[in-house]
Amino acid sequence: MVYFLDASHFVYGGVIGVLWCALRMFIPTGSGRQRLNVLGAIGYRTGRFVAEVNSTSINKETVCALLRKVAKLHRKPITVVLDNARYQKNAVVRELAQTLGIELLYLPAYSPNLNLIERLWKFVKAKALAARLLPDFAAFQQSIEDTLNQIETTYSPQIESLITRNFQMFSDTQLSA
């Protein structure tokens, strides 16, 4: 079983939906920085989605909680593909993964396109936020959580088409001047 794991940080505030307009408009936003942190893992073949959501921060405890959730879902060998974030490479996380029988496969630095869950985050932003202003942080959070809760049901066909091995391979590259 292979899972792709990464965090997404959704920031509440005004998002530019249209870049040019004839009449200058100002979008009211909340003061300060409010964000919803989602640490998620999606199964490669199954589309199974597991997440830890909070409004504080993602850290080693959050990663450990998510790894425990993934381990409860499957008895067979599990590989989790993740990037090189400090909280994911922590010794506590590595020890827990070894205890749970989870292999951690770290992607090369600066290669977010290899982590398939990045496609899911783009999809969630499009469905939950879609360049619209939500009245407050509670509505913002509810919109994102509703979308996350429908990943395995309503949006399953769309997610299945996103989480595929669509990588462009270059075998004999020819450089043109």
Image (cartoon, rainbow, N blue to C red):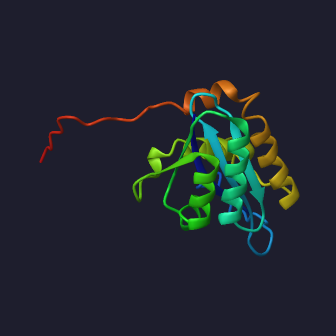
Height in image: 127 above or below 164? below
Q: Is residue 10 left or right of residue 140?
A: left
Who's the residue at 45% across and 47% down the image? Answer: 113
User: In this view of the protein, can residue 95 be seen by the observer?
Assistant: yes
The quadrant the N terminus occupies is top right
Q: Determine the residue positioned at 72% across, 62% down.
A: 25
Image position of 13 with respect to 145: above or below: below
The image position of residue 160, as x and y in percent, is 60, 27
Residue 36: percent from the left, percent from the top?
Answer: 75, 60
Q: Position of residue 69 (x, y in %)?
A: 73, 46
| Residue 22 in sight from this viewpoint | no
User: In the image, is residue 116 above or below residue 165?
Assistant: below
Q: Is residue 80 left or right of residue 23?
A: left
In this view, which residue lies farthest toward the left? 177
Determine the image quadrant of residue 13: bottom right
Q: Quadrant of residue 2?
A: top right
Front-most of 158 and 81? Answer: 81
